[in-house]
Image (tube, rainbow, N blue to C red):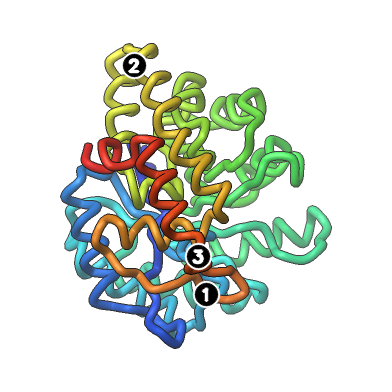
Amino acid sequence: MDLRQFHGAWPALVTPATDDGGVDVSMLAQLTEYLIGKGVDGLYLCGSTGEGVFLSGPERRQVAETVVKQVAGRIPVIVHVGTVATRHAVMLAQHAQEVGADGVASILPPFRRSPEETLIHYEAIAASVPGLPFYPYLFGGETDAVALMQELLLRIPNVAGAKYTGSNLYELRAIIELGDQGWTIFSGMDEQCAFAGMVGSPANIGTTLNLMPGVYREIRVSLDGGDLGRARDLQLQVNRVTRVLHHYGVFGALFEALRVLGMDCGEPRLPRAPMLAEQRAQFHAALTAAGFSALASM
C-alpha cells in the first residue's frame, strides 16, 4: 500500500456537546471551519479530547460524517475508532472508510490484556480496512511501545505509523526509526511538540490546538526552516497557557476557553467535570496573564 506521510499541526478535535451530551452538529461544523481557516494540516476525531469513548456508536459516526463533509477534501482527517469491544471498533473503522476518512487510529484495548490480545485487537481493526492507513495510539510508559510497533509491522501491512503520547523522546525516536519515508509518528504531548519535532516527528496531534492552532503551525514552520530557537520560544510561550488549563482542570478549562474565543461547545461529558461558575473569572484572568489572546490570534 502506498503510504502518505502526514505533516504539521493537527488538532485533536473537540466534539461540541448539546445540553444532553449529544453532538452539536452545527457547532462541530463551525469549529472545523474555524480551524481550517487557521491553517491546520489535518484533524483527528473522536480521540481522548474528542470524547469518543463517551459517545454512542451512532454519535461517533455522526461526528465522522459531519467533519469529513465539512472538510471536503481540503485537509486529511483521521478517525479514532478505539472501543472496549473489538467488533465495535471494526464497525467504526469501516464506517470511517466509507465516508472518506484518510486513516483510522485506535488506543490499546482498555482493560488488562496480554501482548497477543493487543495484537489480535489491532489486527482485526486494521484488516477490516486494508486500503486505509492504520495508526495505533500508544502511551509512553504504559507498554514497550518499540517492541509493540515492531510486532505490528511484521503482522499488519497497513500500519502507517502511530500516535505517541509520552515524554520519553528517546523512545519516540526509536519508533520513528522503525519506519521508512511513508511512516508518520505523530507526537501527542502538546508540551513537547517542538522537542518531538527536533528528534524527527513530522506532525503533532493535541488538545490545545483547538485553542491556539496558529502557534503550533508556526512551531512547525520554524522547525522546517531550521529556526530551532524560535520553535523553542513559541513552545515555552504556549506552555504557559497549557499550565493554566491543567491548573483549572484540562477539559472544563478547554470548553471554557473555547467560549472565550466565541465558540460555545457546551460542557465536557460526564464523568469529566465542567468548570465551576465561581472559577471562571479567575480562570479568565489567568488566561490573560499567560498571553492567551495573542497566542490564539496567530
The residue positioned 53% from the left and 40% from the top of the image is 243
The answer for how far apart the CA atoms under marks 1 and 3 are is 20 Å
What SS does tag 1 mark?
Answer: loop
**Residue 221 image offset from top left, x and y in percent:** 27, 25
The residue positioned 27% from the left and 15% from the top of the image is 225
Pointer 1 local density, CA inside 10 Å: few below 14, some 14–19, many at least 20? many
Pointer 3 local density, CA inside 10 Å: few below 14, some 14–19, many at least 20? few
Instruction: Give the side of residue 283 with respect to residue 271, left or right.
Output: left
Disc sitting over residue 230 in the figure: 2
Instruction: Give the side of residue 100 with respect to residue 38, left or right.
Output: right
Q: Amino acid at mark 1?
A: Arg
Q: Quadrant of the C terminus?
A: top left
Instruction: Give the side of residue 228 with respect to residue 163, left or right.
Output: left
Contact (Cβ within 8 Å) of mark 1 with mark 3: no
What SS does tag 3 mark?
Answer: helix
The residue positioned 41% from the left and 62% from the top of the image is 255
Reading the image, the residue beneath label 3 is: 278
Name the N-terminal-most of marks 1 and 3: 1
Reading the image, the residue beneath label 1 is: 269
Q: Nearer the viewer, residue 36 or 147?
A: 36
What SS does tag 2 mark?
Answer: helix
The answer for how far apart the CA atoms under marks 3 and 2 are is 37 Å
Q: In which quarter of the view is residue 237 placed?
A: top left
Q: In which quarter of the view is residue 83 placed?
A: bottom right
Q: Nearer the viewer, residue 92 or 232?
A: 232
Q: Nearer the viewer, residue 87 or 221?
A: 221
